[in-house]
Image (cartoon, rainbow, N blue to C red):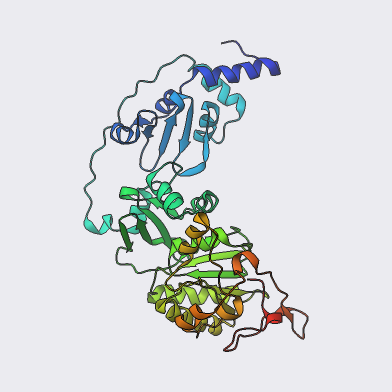
């Protein structure tokens, strides 16, 4: 094909690529092969191509489109596919490659998959399990479970996906990664329509951690008892900036306790640092609130508790209720900050000002040196003028 130089001719050529070059052809030339079994399970409209371990691209729109299960932002036409496969290529290089593929038809050669024979220790290793699963994507079983059943927002799931925190397990189960301080996957919370568990391969729990502003200093930590609860709180959170959302997956291991102490000590260096204890409204939530408050006190960090109003509820219950009807208002902060309150006392309080919808950020109290500080709460919770923005 002759080289086209004018802007109009170049635009016409790019459109010709979109119309005449099948994304499957490009993938086959790059060493990808069709995964027949996976394609049959999904549908003939979504062709799954593999190359090596963990390299997966889905072709749709009859060969004119594609997307990557490992990155929700990677998708588009055949031109973007070439740039995805070769990030170092400029548009001129892409055009030269695609000219030779105009009119070519894919062979749909099948990639023969052999079952790996691995020892049980390797098969239970969290990092191995994590690397052999794709992230949930719009339309997948786990994505539908999280958005339709659990009512988590696509925005929150995209944020978690960008931080490599989600995987899709068998039968629509969602996996939530626990990392150590070095960023290594040490285990995963597993939640699905018919399954609930934790897998660590015997290495112990750590912490699920999602940053609201990746790469920015953290001044506000929100700790919950489960990853879905932490993500639910984040989805409703009006004070998300510079926040870190944690899950301990229930009880804490010695390793997760040590890392929690180190994390809170680092965050406490920020002048406006605080810990939000977003536990359930039940007896276990009361016990965990006491434990998290003690850790905050040890680090010199201000803390306050926020729990749903109704007994037995967690923050995912609140999120789902918001999607179905006018939400039940949460208890005012002056009540929920008291970690010693019993469930009966919390339930009896006639709260009318819901925190998530109505509470406003309040000023921090300046200390002698001019820098803001946050006073400790007493048995009745912080005073109105001393409450920081949550």
Looking at the image, residue 244 sits to the left or right of residue 285; the answer is: right
Residue 273's place in the image compared with 12, above or below, is below
Of the pair 317 and 189, the residue shown nearer to us? 317
The quadrant of the picture occupied by the N terminus is top right
The number of numbered discs placed on residues in the rendered structure image is 0
Answer with the quarter of the image where residue 120 lies.
bottom left
Give percent across and percent down for residue 94.
Answer: 56, 25
Give percent across and percent down for residue 96.
Answer: 56, 20
* Residue furthest out toward the bottom: 379
The residue positioned 38% from the left and 60% from the top of the image is: 188
Give percent across and percent down for residue 127.
Answer: 36, 56
The residue positioned 35% from the left and 55% from the top of the image is: 192
Looking at the image, residue 347 sits to the left or right of residue 51; the answer is: right
Residue 348 shows up from this direction: yes
The residue positioned 44% from the left and 69% from the top of the image is: 313
Answer with the quarter of the image where residue 59 lies.
top left
Looking at the image, residue 288 sits to the left or right of residue 267; the answer is: left
Residue 110's place in the image compared with 188, above or below, is above
The quadrant of the picture occupied by the C terminus is bottom right
Residue 135 shows up from this direction: no
Give percent across and percent down for residue 267.
Answer: 59, 73
The residue positioned 64% from the left and 19% from the top of the image is: 11
Of the pair 134 and 150, the residue shown nearer to us? 150
């Amino acid at each position: 094909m002759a080289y086209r130089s004018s802007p109009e001719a170049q635009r016409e050529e790019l459109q010709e690529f979109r119309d005449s070059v099948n994304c499957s052809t490009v993938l086959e030339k790059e060493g990808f092969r069709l995964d027949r079994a996976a394609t049959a399970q999904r549908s003939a409209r979504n062709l799954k191509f593999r190359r090596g371990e963990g390299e997966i691209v889905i072709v749709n729109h009859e060969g004119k489109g594609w997307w990557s299960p490992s990155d929700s932002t990677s998708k588009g036409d055949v031109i973007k596919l070439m740039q995805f496969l070769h990030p170092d290529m400029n548009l001129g290089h892409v055009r030269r490659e695609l000219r030779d593929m105009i009119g070519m038809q894919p062979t749909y050669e099948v990639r023969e998959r052999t079952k790996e024979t691995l020892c049980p220790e390797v098969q239970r290793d969290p990092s191995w399990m994590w690397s052999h699963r794709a992230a949930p994507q719009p339309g997948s079983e786990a994505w539908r479970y999280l958005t339709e059943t659990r009512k988590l927002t696509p925005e929150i799931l995209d944020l978690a996906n960008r931080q490599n925190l989600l995987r899709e397990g068998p039968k629509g189960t969602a996996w939530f990664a626990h990392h150590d301080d070095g960023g290594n996957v040490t285990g995963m919370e597993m939640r699905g329509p018919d399954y609930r568990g934790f897998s660590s391969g015997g290495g112990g729990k750590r912490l699920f951690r999602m940053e609201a502003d990746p790469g920015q200093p953290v001044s506000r930590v929100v700790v919950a008892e489960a990853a879905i609860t932490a993500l639910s709180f984040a989805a409703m959170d009006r004070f998300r900036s510079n926040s870190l959302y944690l899950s301990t997956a229930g009880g804490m291991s010695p390793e997760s306790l040590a890392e929690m102490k180190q994390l809170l000590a680092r965050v406490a260096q920020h002048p406006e640092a605080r810990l939000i204890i977003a536990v359930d409204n039940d007896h276990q939530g009361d016990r965990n609130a006491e434990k998290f408050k003690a850790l905050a006190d040890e680090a010199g960090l201000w803390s306050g508790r926020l729990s749903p109003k109704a007994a037995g509820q967690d923050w995912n219950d609140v999120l789902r209720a918001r999607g179905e009807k006018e939400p039940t208002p949460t208890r005012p902060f002056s009540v929920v900050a008291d970690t010693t309150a019993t469930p009966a006392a919390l339930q009896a309080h006639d709260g009318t000002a819901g925190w998530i919808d109505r509470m406003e950020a309040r000023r921090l109290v300046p200390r002698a040196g001019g820098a803001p500080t946050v006073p400790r709460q007493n048995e009745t919770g912080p005073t109105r003028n001393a409450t920081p923005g949550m």
